[in-house]
Image (cartoon, rainbow, N blue to C red):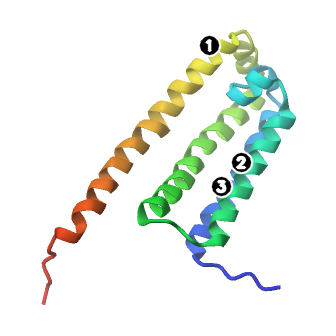
Amino acid sequence: MKIKLNSKILFFLLIIFSFLNLLDVITAMFILPGESNPIYLLTGSSLILWLIKFFFIFMVFYVYFKNEYPSRFFLYSFIYIIVIGIVMISFGVYSNIMGIINPHIVEQASQMTTGQKVSYYGIIVSLFMIIPYIISMVSFKIYDVIESKIKYEVKK
């Protein structure tokens, strides 16, 4: 069975996204006392963390292979989420590796309360993911609304 790729660039991004998600979970298993992922902190289960990671990986490939997007806005949002996900998960993998290399960091993190860890995690996600996403989506929506009314200069 031959798989038809609708966009090689997007497929490549999904492969990176998936690889990093798996690497994130694997490296997190070595630093569980210092782990700050709210899913793990609230459930105390690494199995649920694995299942949620696999669910997200499945969903991005499902959307990709379905190849039907309700709008340009949805497609742009999908790409944005994958790209920012790659960046954010890369930071997670990096911090996990730093914890593996430097056990004293995990020891210090393990002394923090669940509330503190969730709060810090929320701040990082807000600053590096949610706020830029909102700014980007508002900008794109404005562009999408006015683009049909704009005339572009044609160079000869």
Q: Secondary structure at mark 3?
A: helix
Res 152 quadrant in image: bottom left
- The image position of residue 42, as x and y in percent, is 74, 22
Position of 8 with respect to 54 (left or right) is left
Q: On the image, numbered disc 3 is attached to which residue? A: 17
Q: Are marks 2 and 1 in contact (CB under 8 Å)?
A: no
Tell me the amino acid under the disc marked 3. Answer: Phe
Tell me the amino acid under the disc marked 2. Answer: Asn
**Front position in the image: 119 or 34:** 119
Position of 119 with respect to 74 (left or right) is right
Q: CA distance from mark 3 to mark 1?
A: 28 Å
- The image position of residue 10, as x and y in percent, is 57, 68
Res 151 quadrant in image: bottom left
The numbered dot on residue 6 is none
Q: Residue at 64% across / 62% down in the picture? A: 14
Q: Is residue 131 visible?
A: yes
Q: CA distance from mark 3 to mark 2?
A: 6 Å
Q: Are marks 3 and 2 in contact (CB under 8 Å)?
A: yes
User: Which of marks 1 and 3 precedes in the sequence?
Assistant: 3
Q: On the image, numbered disc 1 is attached to which residue? A: 116
**Front position in the image: 34 or 3:** 3
Q: CA distance from mark 2 to mark 1?
A: 24 Å
Q: Residue at 55% across / 26% down in the picture? A: 122
The numbered dot on residue 21 is 2
**Residue 33 vertical position relative to residue 23 in the rendered view, above or below:** above
| Residue at the outermost bottom position | 156
Tell me the amino acid under the disc marked 1. Answer: Gln
Q: Residue at 52% across / 29% down in the picture? A: 124
User: Which of marks 1 and 2 precedes in the sequence?
Assistant: 2
